[in-house]
Image (cartoon, grey):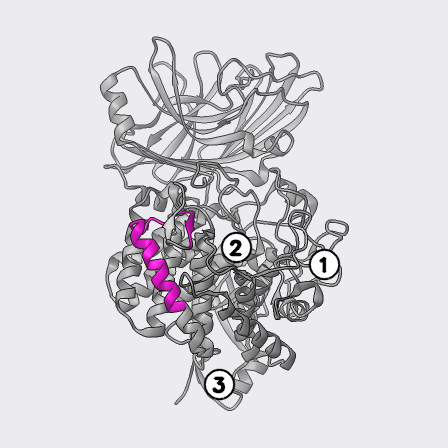
Amino acid sequence: MTRPGAPAPLFVDADGWRLLVAPDAGGNWTLSGESRDGPEEPRALLAVRSPLVSGAGLRLTTRASRVTGAGGSLRIQGQDEVDGGGGCRWEVAFAPVDSGPLVRVDLALAFDAEAELVPDRDPQGDPAVIVWVMETDRLDVRQTFDWHKTLLRFPTRNGQGVRGNDLAAVYLYDPVARAQTVVHFDLSRAAWFADLRGFTRYDTGLVVRQTQQGPVRYGVGLYGAQGPAAPFRPGELRLTWYVGTQGRAASPTAWEALEVLVDWLAPVFAPAVPIADPSWKDIAAGTVEDVMRPETTVRVAGLTGQRAYVAGSSRVWGTVEDSFELMTQVDVALPALLYLRLHPDPRLAAHVDTLLDSLTRFWRRDFGYLTNTFPWTPGADERIDTWYLLENALIKCGWIALLTGRRDLESAVIASLRWARELAHQCNHLFPLFCQGKTASPVAQSLNVSAGGLYAYGAIVGYRLDGGRDLLAEAASALTAMHSAPVELLHHEPQQLGFAALAAMELSRLEPDPRWRRMADDFLRAQLAMAYWHEDVLAGAAGYRVQGGFQACASILYPAMKENVESIVPWVALMRMGEPAPVAVMLRVLAAQRANNAYFYPRFLPAGTFTDGGGCPSIPLENLAMAEPSGAVGEVGQEVYGAGEGLFMHLIFDALARSEHPGVLVASLDVLDLERPIYPPSARSFLLAQFGAERVTARIRFFALDPRTTYRIAPGAASPRSGAALMEEGVDVELSGERPVRLELTPES
């Protein structure tokens, strides 16, 4: 709001509000915000003027500044002195995002060679960007704010509160002003961090400031989290961030707040540009060869299995010769079973049979579950990483049993489900991070709450195996408990939330109830908080990309091929059942992964980035280095337990159909459909999308159809076409804007 007698502030209009930029009494440029909802008098939403940069002995003033633009966009340039000596040329640009209430702010600071930017005495003295929301010295107002606010802050944190490096954003509902505010920091343009000491020295969240006798001030933003702060080096620092605010009548739940945050941020996710449009068919063919090499296999106690890492590739774990893991066997075997139905290969079939024959040797008949390590010692207790058992023994082994009809494996899966049910009941479906094998009981106090999503989907797979409806009740209980937990406790492995969403969609199909669809959308948004929405500074400078990947585990600070793809495999199955609410962001993630997951393979990296690939170029690296300390590229090794994900990428993106237009995404929705476990199905479903405002016509070519069968195509061809014509000529599909198109091929009876 403008004070009487003060000059009218500069402004930028966005959906539902106006960003005001004006100098304070000391001549320092500040921002604030007011509503612009219809004919009513504007009211303050961001009532406290916020400096454009704070906490660092630097103020951006009107002393030597120049303003251009207004309303639609705004740019201010200036030059000021730094408290520690020297000068700084600076520029701040404001522009509304094309759709929604966000305003983009681009900040650039260029320091003289003599400048020494010394943080002030503030406890959070590093340079900060804080949007102040409210200021008060009344206890009743402070209590109203503290007790009735809704706050979500990201990046995600693990169960012990250690922060990661994924989505940097904050949501705050102010119950006093009845306003919701979102701030988001684009780390792809944050030379601010890469030139200093990494984003892990900073944090995002709520900031509370109080002087000895003065008012309390509340704000949200980016600030130094670890001290002591250090002077900035001379040179140019940049930061791009976004702010949006709107009125809201009542306090939202955390899930409602997360919906606002993800929906508002959706337009800022710019999909990656494909790197020479990688052929996942070719990568998968190379993977098939590599998983059969001596470097990726090991023989232990008369059994042949897959190693966890290519021999000699891991500087962290070394080479293990005396055991192998269930996780690696099923990671390769499950997608290989589907791959073989499209690309018959006697050598691969024999190799997969060898892996399948090993699975029941993981059966712990003494305690009643499929363990992760072979060989195991009878009677010896073990500490289990809970998600390993739930994902591998219940979901992947369950799917393998569905696809192969192996009764011995089916029996082991159902028994493992009974063991997991005992654990679930002991912890009221709030799963622990670790559990004890002998007693099916939690270990210590660390939680892995979203492991309940794996348990729920595993229970539904078990229901498909033996028809016990009590397993559907177990799935419902697990999802309900998970949904009742605080959002910030749900982040561990990102695929856990994807399978939770898929389980909720499966329940909505089996036991129709609108709450399951709402839960699915909520879990998907929580999962998207673990995605890398923007490019990493170090990765971009080094010549590879990580955008669209997921932080492999909360606080681990890098993406991995295994978790990237396991996070999207549930999506294509649930998209077949209906379009989820956050589909716009999900499609951007799919497009980014289609391009960027190729960088996990040594031959797609810039020359010299990774030199230990040897004879297995189609086994992915586990880690790609980022600005935070996450190890050198490939340091953890080439993960054989992520090799199957290269096969899944082929199955999703170019096994059954492919666009001839490089900007059009085609995703097959027929992977792991419990309603139709036969693969490939005779009827096919695809989701198509492009990411521009223009109208695009794309030629879609199909594969693995029966050439003699006639198919109806919707939308697309006006008349049915033969499978031979669809494979040879394809069909043209028109896409307008960013609205996805569901493409169906149905054989005529």
Q: Which residue occupies 26% across, 31% down?
A: 148
Q: Are marks 2 and 3 in contact (CB under 8 Å)?
A: no
Cα distance between the residues tagged 2 and 3: 39 Å
Give amino acid for label 1: Arg
Q: Which residues are magenta?
A: 413-437
Q: Secondary structure at mark 2?
A: helix
Mark 2: few/some/many CA within 10 Å (<14, 14-19, 20+): many
Q: Picture coordinates of residue 117 (x, y %)?
A: 61, 18
Assess whether residue 430 is covered by the magenta stretch. yes
Q: Secondary structure at mark 3?
A: strand
**Left or right of 288, for residue 683:** left
Q: Nearer the viewer, mark 2 or mark 1?
A: 2
Residue marked by disc 2: 563
For the C terminus, the quadrant is bottom left
Question: Can you tell which quarter of the image residue 407 is in?
Answer: bottom left
Q: Nearer the viewer, mark 3 or mark 1?
A: 1
Q: Is residue 719 above or below residue 625?
A: below
Q: Picture coordinates of residue 523 (x, y %)?
A: 37, 52
Q: Picture coordinates of residue 336 (x, y %)?
A: 56, 72
Residue marked by disc 1: 603
**Left or right of 289, for residue 149:** left
Cα distance between the residues tagged 2 and 1: 21 Å
